[in-house]
Amino acid sequence: MQNPDSRNLWLAVALWSVVTFAGGLGAVLYAEANRQAEMETAWRRAETQAAAAEDSLLSGLEAVRSSLQLLLLRQRLIDYGDAPGAMALEAVLKDLAQEGRHGIVLLSVADLAGRMVWSSAPDVVGNDISGRSYFTELTDGSGRQFSASPPEMERAASGWRVHAARPIPAADGAPVAIAVVSLDPLLLSGTLGQQVSRPGHSIVIHRLSDGTVRAISWDAETLLGHRPQPQHPVILAAQLTDRGRIVIDMPGEEGRVVAAWRVAGTSGMVVSARFDLAEEMANDTRLTVMLSLAVVLLSCGTLVICLAWSRGRSLHRRLLQEARHDPLTGLHNRRSLEAQMAGRAGPYAALLFDLDHFKSVNDRHGHDMGDRVLRDVAQALQGAVRPEDLVCRWGGEEMLVVLSRCPPGDAAPRAEALRRVIASLYAGRGQPIEAITASIGVACAPLHGAALPALIRAADAALYRAKAEGRDRVAMAEA
């Protein structure tokens, strides 16, 4: 017979093993969840900074276009013999260049031979730019209407310059001169530096075609003028899609960085915000150490996990409340939808979707699979509607689609088409989920209500009827 003390020891060892295993497994799972949350937070900060930098760049480009238009207006005043008006405008242009706003430091006009005939800086008049690339691109007979140089070191200006140019046509449309706006990329870099919130953050502007650096938020002079980087990961990614996220292994001491990029409209430039990954994940590293100690000591692990989870969940909820888009599906949330619908005139249709028996998906396959289903449905709906239509996650498994310019006669057929799109998502693909269906309530403005809240109530009543009649169907609101 086994000694009771020995049996109790084995029971204690077994209980300790179970608790240790459960604590270790919980610690690993929580550490991974926290890592994902930290990563997502880093992505969101990077995307916010990239968007702000893109706005700054687009504002600068608009200022360049406006300056070129002012130079064109100056020529028009001269053509029409309005010398006083031309002189007044020249004074405005000189003040604009002196301010250095948006990096603009010089405005000039060159004749078709490449000789500067007017400039906001008098000592530039008479200079020859006939051999400069931005000039020859406009005078080689190709008919180009805009040209921009990469950053170039200007000895006369004792600094870096980027030149933007366009032809100035006469009244008959034939070019008579070239307007040139010169920018200091270091001023633009300084503007980017003001937007950086941490030492491990940086913002870079590349030319999308070849990866040439136009500006960077730190130490810009070390990169301006260097060889192009057409194989840079951000350049390769931005050539495929106009915005996104990426993790990059940087050479030297920079290590790994997370980056968010945005292609700035039709400017041919890409803005990226980069964060040092080690710095961003420092909190996660410290938390992992704390959890490991908690598992070894078996005394405060549960408390640490609960407090940290509560903190993470509170942060997650706050982010959800503040975001304009649903973080799980990427769709508009209610606040965003209501803002975009304010003042919209009909006819339009509101389609309220409810995924049938969605709770059973979570119960049978887990919440990760439920989240995947919501993302798949959201992506399918987004891809099946027109650009002017709106798709919103209304709550839980409910989604709302607003069809613009949709008369009542078209609403039900289009809703039926979307219902079939959802029904075909998993059908016949051997997925763990064999089928997903949706019930849809449809209401049209102004037939069922002039304002969005009334329209939603009508669509909800129709949705309730569709579910009561057997689900997986479309029901039209009653007039």
Image (cartoon, grey):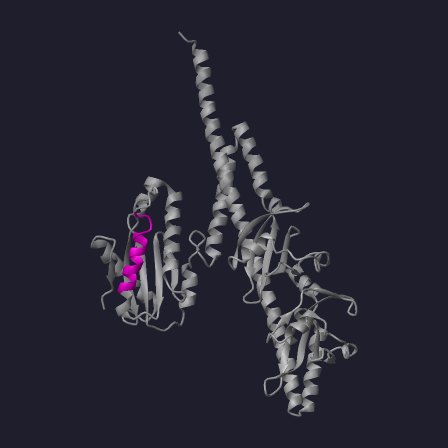
- Residue displayed at 47% across by 23% down: 16
Q: Nearer the viewer, residue 391 or 194?
A: 391
Residue 48 in the image: state x and y as whole percent. 55, 58
Q: Nearer the viewer, residue 270 or 6?
A: 270
Q: Quadrant of residue 7?
A: top left
Q: Quadrant of residue 67?
A: bottom right
Residue 293 in the image: state x and y as whole percent. 56, 31
Whether residue 223 is visible here, answered yes or no, is yes
- Residue displayed at 66% across by 91% down: 82
Check the picture and name the quadrant holding the C terminus: bottom left
Q: Is residue 26 above or below residue 135?
A: above
Name of the residue lying farthest toward the left: 469
Q: Quadrant of residue 14?
A: top left
Whether residue 311 is visible here, answered yes or no, is no
Q: Is residue 110 above or below residue 359?
A: below
- The kind of secondary structure the magenta stretch mainly shows is helix
Report the number of numbered marks: 0
Q: In the image, which residues are magenta?
A: 412-427
Q: Nearer the viewer, residue 409 or 128?
A: 128
Residue 441 in the image: state x and y as whole percent. 27, 60
Q: Is residue 420 magenta?
A: yes
Q: Is residue 344 magenta?
A: no
Judge from the rendering whether residue 304 lies leftward or rightward of residue 91; answer left or right. Answer: left
Check the picture and name the quadrant holding the N terminus: top left
Judge from the rendering whether residue 346 lies leftward or rightward of residue 17; answer left or right. Answer: left
